[in-house]
Amino acid sequence: MSSVDWHPGSWRDKPAAQLPLYADPDALLAAERSLSQAAPIAPIGESEELKRQLAEAAVGRAFLLQGGDCAETFDGPSLDRVQSLADLFAHLAFTLSAATTTPVVRVARIAGQAAKPRGISTEQRGDQSAPVYRGDLVNGYAFDPASRRADPARMLQGHAHALATKALIDRLPSPLFTSHEALLLPYEEPLVRRDAAGGRHWSVSGHFLWVGDRTRQPGGAHVEFLRGIANPIGIKCGPTLTAQELLALCDLLDPDREPGRLTLIVRLGANQIDAVLPGWMRTLKAADRQPLWVCDPMHGNTERGGPRKLRRYDVMLAEVRRFLAIASAEGIWPGGLHLEMTPEPVTECLGGSGPAHPDDLSDWRSACDPRLNGDQALDFAADVARLAAQAVAA
């Protein structure tokens, strides 16, 4: 997979979007050196098994359910919370498996999803300003300059938190695979290990890593990093991505067309999916590519305005409905669903079993974007299952 000119640090010669500026280069180097000796979070053998399962999903013999927090925080991981998330996955998987008549691959946004891309670099509140919060892996949530300073020691804290979370997952009867956006490259690079048997480089920071819609530049640092690791990887695909650019990314990230290697996470929005998705699917199909196509109905349907972002259940479901219909029309298996969700009884999204009016979004706990609560997620899975069963029957 990786070409002879790739190594875990070759991204450093490329332009890098969304990376924080660290005031103390020596402290950053010390943290990276510590991470290079740190214990693996995601063993290589488990990542190989996930790739095998995703290969089945890409050809219509399985379905991917990926979900969890928008942004993890460093609150102490608890077995009860991890168990609650696993139970939610189990309920959703049961519903989706019955509709698709396939096994469901369970991949959580967990044990590493603690760095976030942001559209601004500075946050303003009244006459006060501070660097924007970029996730606990980078800086603190509290609105003050000291908390918002990028601190490389947080990478070590993040590794310890992820390792503890993975240990809890391993105690479950049906463990979850882990996933996160490969955003903070100074954290990701030192957590690459070489498989002695096969000679390939693997990330041990998570089983499944993805490149975000803000960092998917073909000549950029994030694509450069991901092209050389052997893990299954994803591309978040937003509406500014052209069909030819998507094909070029597939060629860069999966030149050998390896089964289970590439997942395309579609996040277009209900109002743009019809204009964009058919062209993507036709272009890749004509190029004889068969990635795993997954619908993320959350990120393309985020409304801005007011004190917080907003997502509407009915609008998100509308995007899934069109995703399934378009895939069916193009002769492509609609292979998965990507949700931001929590088992906690939060009120962050409108609709379903949740609040009907923005004024009722009173119990907000997300560190970044709104999530479906447990009841809303169950409703959503049931509605998606109904739509999927109709698509399979057709």
Image (cartoon, rainbow, N blue to C red):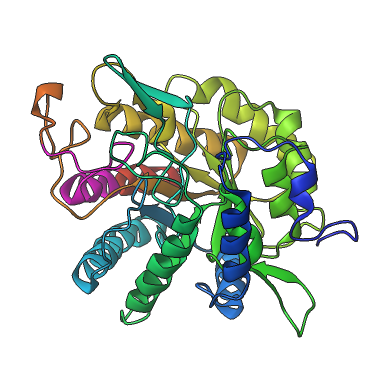
**What residue is at 47 percent from the left and 43 percent from the top?**
150
Asked if residue 145 lies left or right of residue 187, the reply is left
Residue 91 coordinates in the image, percent (x, y): 25, 62
* Figure label count: 0
Q: Which residues are magenta?
A: 363-383
Asked if residue 250 lies left or right of residue 97, the reply is right
Q: Decide whether residue 372 is among the magenta residues.
A: yes
Residue 8 in sight here: yes
Name the residue at the bottom extreme: 197
**What residue is at 37 percent from the left and 47 percent from the top?**
71
The quarter of the picture where residue 275 lies is: top right
Residue 135 coordinates in the image, percent (x, y): 41, 45
Q: Is residue 315 above or below residue 343?
A: above
**What residue is at 30 percent from the left and 64 percent from the top?**
94
Quadrant the N terminus occupies: bottom right
Q: Decide whether residue 317 is among the magenta residues.
A: no
Which residue is at the front of the view, 221 or 266?
Answer: 221
